[in-house]
Image (cartoon, grey):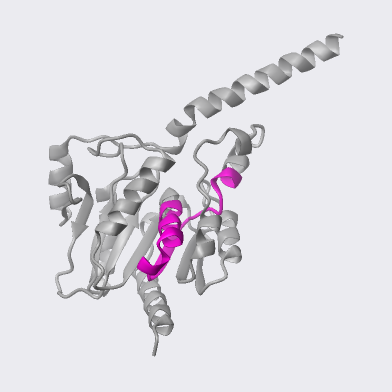
Amino acid sequence: MRSFGLLFIGLMGYAVASIGCASYQRSIIYQPPHFAAERVQNSARAAGFERWSNTLGQPIGIKRPSLTQPARGCVLITYGNASWSVGCARYADDLQQIAALDVFVLEYPGYADRAGSPSQKNILQAANEALQTLGTNGPVYLIGESLGSAVATYLAGTQPDRVSGVILLSPFNRLTSLARYHMPMLPAGLILVDRYAPQDYLRDYHGAVGIMVDGRDEVVPEKFGQRLYDSYSGPKKLWRFPEGSHISIMKPPLKFWSEVLDFWQNNHLASQPS
């Protein structure tokens, strides 16, 4: 009986810990910075961006048109869980140094000065709206960083005709798999509320997908990006940086972006009717 009682207490403690994790998991998944509108405006301007608004005039992110017009296409960037729109200016700097591209960065609900709260439902709805807001007179490419890789693959899978190419920086195949890795003693597959699944999203996409993984990534170990790469059946390319960490996704070399653009454009042209 005593052993049964200890087992019962242990199971109850495990259950309480699991429920507690479920209750606070969004504060673990999402770590939004909060800024006043004036600071966002000033930071965007200092980085060479302007505010990007929806059809109702509500700010949904930032944008930087190419200095050369007409642009050869546009890029939509979805960032990681602790970043924000202006934090992605470095990607625009490199991309626009190489090609005439209009760059847009989505701001998630509850991040910076955007109203709302971050959740899978709210972020994916915001991403859908953002993609629909972009013009249709040129190719649209997606860049997804860490958590943002799930947002990018969702857009590619649900609106495949709108997306000409994707690049994923330190992605995962399923959030449940990543959660089990970080919390092996908890039933992450049962208690996880937001269940991003890039591997499933890409089943309905057949365009060019590039994936970058880092050998010393402690947040999203490279095996999760490798799983996503292996599962994808369309045109794909893998960039592996054995000595890179999770922070490396913020500063890949300029040569990397040149290779990404070549990969996108070659596969986009190959997929066009002759």
Which quarter shows the C terminus?
A: bottom left
Residue at the (34%, 34%) spot, across then down = 117
Q: Magenta region: which residues?
A: 149-178
Outermost residue to the right:
1
Q: Answer yes or no: is residue 160 visible.
A: yes
Please tell me which residue is depicted at 48% across the width and 63% down the height of the picture: 212
Q: Which sits in the foreground, 84 or 126?
A: 126
Q: Percent x, y for residue 206? A: 49, 70
In the image, residue 263 above or below residue 183: below
Q: Quadrant of the N terminus?
A: top right
Which is nearer the eye, 14 or 139?
139
Q: Is residue 23 left or right of residue 139?
A: right
Q: Position of residue 156 (x, y in %)?
A: 42, 62
Query: Is any part of residue 241 visible from this angle?
Result: no
Horizontal arrangement in the rendering, residue 18 relative to residue 204 (left or right): right
Q: In the picture, residue 98 is in which quadrant? A: bottom left
Magenta segment includes 151 = yes
Task: Please tell me whether residue 73 is drawn above or below residue 31 in the rendered image.
Answer: below
Q: Residue at x 38, y 62 (%)?
A: 252
